Amino acid sequence: MPASEPLLTLEPLLEAVREGLEADGWALSGLQKTTSYEFEGRWAGDSSRSAYLFFHAEGVPEWVSIDVFLDETTRGLKGNLALVVDGPELAKVRDPEQTLSHLAAVAQEALPSGYRTPLTLRYRLPRLTGDPADSDTEFRFKLYLPPSALQAGHSAVVALAESTAGAFRGILGSEELAPLLAAEEA
């Protein structure tokens, strides 16, 4: 497939994203594909093929990954790349509102502009009888692949994936994230 033809199916999109992330030094550590045919309600009659990819990199802690979700439906392709950081226990994230504010500023500076880039802070209580202060935290910096990149083709998706991976490295090296990473290493 020529590098400038639109990406229309899952496999060429998967290969372009993989190529871009690997160009920045991230190695594929897991891949799962699913196909779904039976939907009810508003999705009745649709089908979906999805891929979940997981990447890790040398020199990056094992609790940091890039997770990718790609989806091919009867309505077209979509996908996102997410920097996933397992954070410290909730007690060490002193002020969630302030934490989100600082991390959003870091992401806004690092990630390419003009894209949909949400930030998620998750809490996970390991047991219902556990102390909420011991809850796990997780940060997800996400970039959604725009339809324009898919239309532009393989080269555009490779370039976007590679630049996003570089931006994720910038986020990991930021002063605002450093205290949260140090708390996780402790």
Image (cartoon, grey):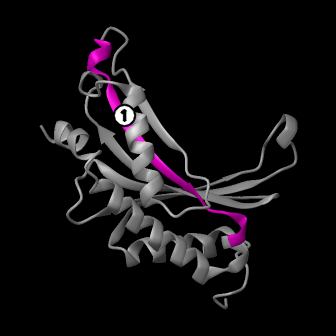
Q: Please determine whether, in this image, residue 9 is positioned above or below residue 92.
A: below
- Locate residue 145 relative to residue 163 in the image: left or right: right
- What residue is rendered at 28% in x and 47% in y? 63
Q: Give the quarter of the image for residue 98.
A: top left
Place of residue 90 in the rendered image (x, y in percent of width and height, measured from the top left): 30, 24
Viewer-side residue, 125 vs 90? 90
In magenta, the rendered stretch is 131-148
Amino acid type at circle 1 is: Thr
User: Around disc 1, counting alpha carbons within 10 Å, would you say few (fewer than 14), some (14 to 19), or many (20 or more)?
Assistant: some
Residue at the disc numbered 1: 99
Residue nearer the viewer, 148 or 70:
148
Question: For residue 76: magenta?
Answer: no
Task: Look at the image and tell me in which quarter the C terminus lies.
Answer: top left
Q: Position of residue 18 (x, y in %)?
A: 48, 72
| Tally of numbered discs | 1
Q: Position of residue 6 (x, y in %)?
A: 73, 79
Asked whether the viewer can see residue 69, the reply is: no
Q: Position of residue 109 (x, y in %)?
A: 43, 57
